[in-house]
Amino acid sequence: MDHFYITTPIYYVNDKPHIGHAYTTILADVLARYHRLLGVPTHFLTGTDEHGQKVQNAAARHGISPIEHCNETIVHFQKLWERLGITNDDFIRTTQQRHIRVVQEALQDLWDRGLIYKSTYQGWYCVGDERFYKDKDVQDGKCPDCGRQLEQFEESCYNFRMSNYQQQLIDYIQAHPKFIQPDHFRNETLGYLKKPLEDLCISRPKSRLSWGIELPFDHDYVCYVWFDALVNYISAIGYLHDEEMFRKWWPVNYHLIGKDILTTHSVYWPTMLMAMNVPLPQTIFAHGWWLTNDVKMGKSNHNAVNPMDMIDRYGVDAFRYYLIAAMSLGQDANFQEEFFNTRYNAELANDLGNFVSRALTMTTRTNGGAIPPAVGEDDPSTQALVLLCKKAVREMPDAIDNMHLDAGISSIMTVVREANRYWSERKPWEMAKEGRQDELNVVLRTSLETIRIVSGLLYPVMPEKMAVVRRALAIPEDKLAPDYTMLSQWYVLQDGAQVTLPPPLFPKVQLEPEEPAAPANAPAPAPKAKKAKKDAPAEVVTLDEVGKVSLKTATILSAEKVPDAEKLLRLQIQLGAETRQIVSGIAQWYKPEELTGKTIVVVANLKPATIRGVESKGMLLAAKAGDTLRLVTLDGDIPSGVSIG
Ligand code: MSP
């Protein structure tokens, strides 16, 4: 790869950043950091989308000018990115001159070439989403996307000849399987393109909306905010103004986006680029939503979680780790502090923090802190740990290339768990007590090398904490950011170098009890009477108990085999508004292609699990008799996400 250019969507300035925004930006940051470590020249762009009706209205409400409003609100984003350790190379604002001039030049060129024309628009407008709809897309005057009341109107407008490019775009998507990812979003776009593609209204009369980029060929109009915003991806890297820079970074490797802005990116943007004669992006990658109690997190749903609160409680790195580890790309995920807290305490405090601390402490106590010399790894448990480390290093580039970061992290954490098991098995404290120094040296050196590799692999995800760990291993300052070629090698630490003991890396965090705790001197509460099991026969359950299991209908969107696991299939399912992934041991009975489109029944509230490195959220129901297995399906049409009870 000769370059890596990655972008986030540019964020609307009318909203305070929440976990949904933080997620995309952290994901882009992790990918940018990985590529820099791999030695690939990298450019990471983020920014803010500052024009449009919502900003104009918000500014008016506050009695300030739109640009004053933007200047005040972008600070929330910039501060959060700084706090999260985001290493963007550029921050574009659509109110900057460098952007405005490119939008105007592109518009003028399209107008001159007859690719924009004037006509009359009749239809519906959603103020909330800033989108127009035709009669055929609207029922009862409600927005088909957000359900809010639409406004009906008619006005003169300028249209972009988007329809010219419909077939060209379909052909391109079909010839380039990686262009829209994951596959179910590629299929969604192809589905959208089955209907005739209409031309796109790209103007707004100033009489209604003045806060935008003026059309160069008609001063009474400004540009539609999406047509303006999408151009940021090229205006920021010198399109039409810095030929050399533009050639260096374009085509972009990844446009990371949330699934709600798929059509604007997978249809509007490519057709705009085709009209401008600019090559198309390599990959548009859509991720799912962060939900709170199954509802999309966002300002309008009043359920947004403020990232700053989580950072205050758990630290920046743990927050970055959790967001990346807990979302399978392309799927939705529920953000609940209980889940975060459980994984934090188990994976970071117990597994990783504990292992680093015990290895460094034992080296300090038994060897005066000196890294023991490299001395072979003959016993099977040591060999197994070395192999596992090498496997995690080998798998990471694939996990990055295929955007399976959660799986990559899961294989690193397998190494950490195995390393703790290695200690339980080898019992180095007994070796120390019995003076078996050679054996002890093997365990210590193996453990310290393991920590070097794990901290290197996790460095892009948790840069601050992993720098602390690597400093404690006496790794020189200029090597704290690891050189990836060194991670696949063993015995890289310096013999005899002095390790140090850092403060606890991930102190345990106790969730606040829901009821106020009793004062310390209060009499101890009477022990709660244990519910006698014999109240009811074991095979009988109460309605309450049944109610705990949430059974729902789900439609299978796609299915594929899990590599190296012949019994398992990975299914993408639609569960109401949510898409999820589940892993199921049904490969023996169903071919992946037989499953697409089936409506099945799933246990929707099963605790998520990672099966062979693949996250599974839920369980499907099937009946098995002897060698036969059949899925539980429904005997007629019913939407997905419907509760069964
Ligand atoms: N300004 C447009 C993007 C223009 S890009 C040329 C926009 N801005 S936004 O601020 O509303 O959203 C920015 C991104 O945040 C989108 O990718 C959106 O999907 C993402 N998220 C907003 N809420 C989200 C969640 N609850 N979960 C995950 N991401 C979501 O759209």
Image: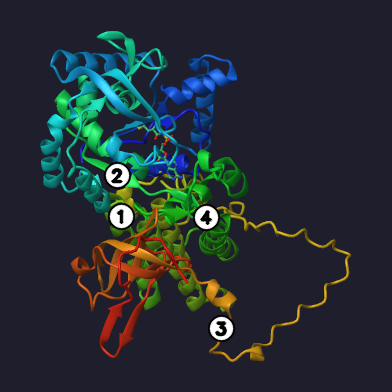
Relative vertical location of residue 245 with respect to residue 327 in this rendering, above or below: above
| The N terminus sits in image quarter | top left
Q: Which residue is mark 4?
A: 293
Q: Position of residue 201 (x, y in %)?
A: 27, 24
Is residue 451 at least partly visible in the picture?
yes
Q: Report the disc number at residue 285.
A: 2
Amino acid under disc 4: Asn
Could you say which quadrant of the image residue 623 lies in? bottom left
- As measured in the structure, the alpha-carbon distance from the residue carrying label 4 to the one carrying label 3 is 26 Å
Dot 2, how many residues are within 10 Å of its Cα: few (below 14), some (14-19), or many (20+)? Answer: many
Q: Which badge, 4 or 1, is on the more N-terminal residue?
A: 4
Q: Position of residue 311 (x, y in %)?
A: 57, 44
State which mark lies toward you, 4 or 2: 4
193 vs 273: above or below: below
Q: Are marks 3 and 2 in contact (CB under 8 Å)?
A: no
Of circles 2 and 1, which is in front? 2
